[in-house]
Image (cartoon, rainbow, N blue to C red):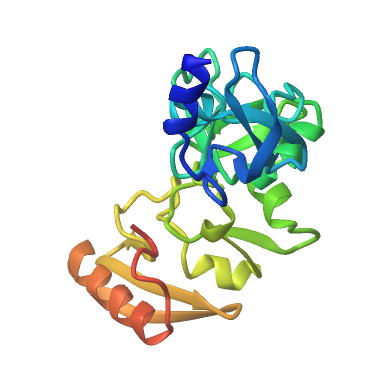
Amino acid sequence: RLLTMKLEKALKDLTGQLFGCLKVVDLGSVRGKQGQRMWNCVCTCGENRLVMQQSLTTGNTRTCGNRLRHPPNATVLGDGCVLMDVSTPSHPGMFTQIDPEDLPKVVGIRQRWLYHDSAPGETWGKYVVASDRKTRLHRLIAGASGSLQTDHLNGNTLDNRKANLKTVTAAQNAKNQKRRRTNTSGHTGVYATKGGFIAEIQAGGVKHHLGLFETAYEASIAYRAAAKVLNFSNRHGL
């Protein structure tokens, strides 16, 4: 009886608060084995669960417990973001970020998600792909299909939260693209030729010749100026 009174005194109103994937709905009518009050919670995957206050506030319980919808390799952070392990033997310690509500969709394909780093000679760089080597995580979450592409707005291809993803055309995506790995001059849109360095920029399927320059740096300045006029992003080509 004394323990129950102490627990009642320590009771806080958690209604509406988010603890990992669990959002508190209201105070439950059921008590724990030692008289603890239980909170009715709804998980981001749609499951309902009764959870003790201490389990919520200490972080011991952060999901509904469904291991299919909340796999062991995924960790819910304090801000509600999910950190998912996508490590491979050649690339250990790699994690991707996704939104909690996308976790059921991500684990629903029943494949292992892996970090992929393209070979030095390949055009594209780092991204997360399913073990079938066909399904890319950012396209699945953004719902991109056909020729449409998915742009990572901050340039971090391991940040697959919806706020960082935008479905775009190939031309739009090119305006926010990093410098390609096949680039040899060290500057996007610049390549060496006899007598100096040529700067060119492509927009809307049209290639624009910007001139011949003595140095790669001078050619790069011309390219950056043209990119600004054509409304390319500030991080394009970096």
Which x, y percent locates residue 208? Answer: 46, 81
Residue 67, picture quadrant: top right
**Residue name at image x 51 percent, y 42 percent:** 81
View extreme (bottom): residue: 229
- Residue 129 in the image: state x and y as whole percent: 66, 35
Q: Is residue 142 left or right of residue 58?
A: right
Q: Is residue 89 above or below residue 136?
A: above
Q: Can you see residue 137?
A: no
The picture places residue 78, in percent across and down from the top left corner, at: 44, 38
Q: How many marks?
A: 0
Closer to us: 163 or 121: 163
Q: Nearer the viewer, residue 121 or 50?
A: 50
Q: Residue at x 60, y 39 (%)?
A: 21
| Image position of 63 (left or right of 109) | left
Report the residue at 26% width, 68% height from top: 220
Residue under the point 64% across and 68% down: 168
Q: What is the x, y in percent for residue 3?
A: 48, 15
- 183 vs 64, left or right, is left
- Up/down of 165 relative to 201, above or below: above
Q: Quadrant of the C terminus?
A: bottom left
Nearest the viewer among 44 and 222 is 44
Q: Nearer the viewer, residue 131 or 190?
A: 131
- Residue 106 visible at all: yes
